[in-house]
Image (cartoon, rainbow, N blue to C red):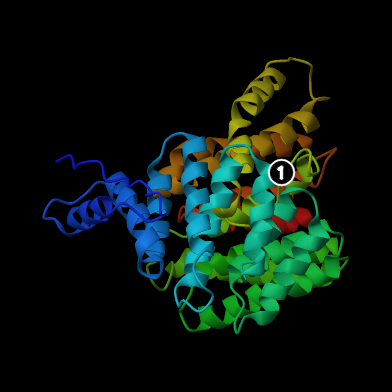
Amino acid sequence: MNHPEIRGKMTDAGKIDEDAVLRARVLLLGSDRPTRREEVEAYRVLARVSPLAYLPKLAGALILLGYEARAEETKVALHAEAADAARRLPAGVPARAELTQRALGAYERSLFGAGRRSEGRAVCEELAETGRGGRLSEVRAEEGRHREAAALLGAVAAEAAEVSDWTVYPWAAELSAAGLHEEAVDAFALAVTKGRRKAAEDDTPLAGLVWELVHHAGLLDAAGRPGEAGAARREALELLVRLAADGEPKSWSNILHWWVTLFTLSGRAAEPAASPAAPMPPFGAAGHEWSPDTREAYVAGIPALEAEAAALAGAGDGDHRLPERYAVHRRLTLRRSFATEWHGHRIEEPLRPLFDEGVALARRLAGTRPAALPQALTDRAMFLVAVGRFGEALDDYREAIVTHA
């Protein structure tokens, strides 16, 4: 049912049209549910009359209407209005802080989605002042300001009773990107320690701890601590032996985001350095936390990499271009894995050939680029863990450890 127009006009005395107020109340109390847009129009009118009661409702409805909008600039306008409505609430209103964070979060993402990055960054800075510094850290990371991002994430970690993995992963990643390798090792150790404790209580997937141990080993290598890196790899191998024999002790829902996040992070060094003029994804953060522009650009690069990989494969120039071919193929594998994360159990069919080809290319490189084979075998082993092929994963990882040594 279409409801009559309820947008009110201000009288000469500056008061809202009482007829508009009445129509708004009737609309909201009627038996016919208004559309989201009609609801917003009603709240706009009533927020002028009873701001404490209706500004929160207006802000919430604007946020949802913005999510439903197709045009990016429409999203921006609606979320800007939501943020303004939340800001207009007095400081003592209980819902103000949470609502302001929601509205600013929606607003900044709309701005990034519309390509208005500088404005989005400014809103992220405002959001950080409300206590949500994590989002600003991701923007700093995307622009190559790694020390600043690490400091923001470190502050979040310092305030938490128990640090979430989704703070630890990007925190360690930003420390590493800033060249603070010892600090990155110590930060990531928080996730490993918690993973060990929870695994002992059957309160976390063993697969997750395997991925964390393997990533921690890489951080230890970067810090010049090969003995500890080897110990971490052996611990991961012991867990794989257990998984191959008995499987996971408990059934878990989709945990692919753990694997994808750490796998994508492992490819950061092969990507161009991030800068404010040429932002890159905030590797180490979960994919849904990336700004819309960097996420879309990362996935949009897949066809070009596919074409480059195909051209190199068909070049017929012998093996001298194998290093380049392997590097391009790995970048393609990383991006395709990121793009297919949400396919759940259906990721094996499209991704398995990519990992198999990576291992095949690395075997051909073993004489000239010995680091390629343990890397490719580890990549495939961690993918096989993600799809529950624990026996095959164990075989690959055993060989990876031997070739790494």
The x, y position of residue 368, in whole percent, is 85, 37
Residue at figure coordinates x 38%, y 43% from the top left: 68
| Residue 24 in the image, given as x and y percentages of width and height | 25, 53
- Placement of 3 over or under 150, stated as above or below: above
- What residue is disc 1 on? 280
Write the residue at 43% across / 68% down: 248
Q: Secondary structure at mark 1?
A: loop
- Residue 319 visible at all: yes
**Which of the pair 239/126 is nearer the observer?**
126
Horizontal side, residue 38 vs residue 298: left or right: left
Q: Position of residue 224 (x, y in %)?
A: 88, 65
**Residue ranking furthest to the front:** 12
Quadrant containing the C terminus is bottom right
Name the residue located 70 percent from the left edge and 60 percent from the top edge. Answer: 137
- Residue 229 quadrant: bottom right
Which residue is the extreme one toward the left?
31
Q: Quadrant of the N terminus?
A: top left
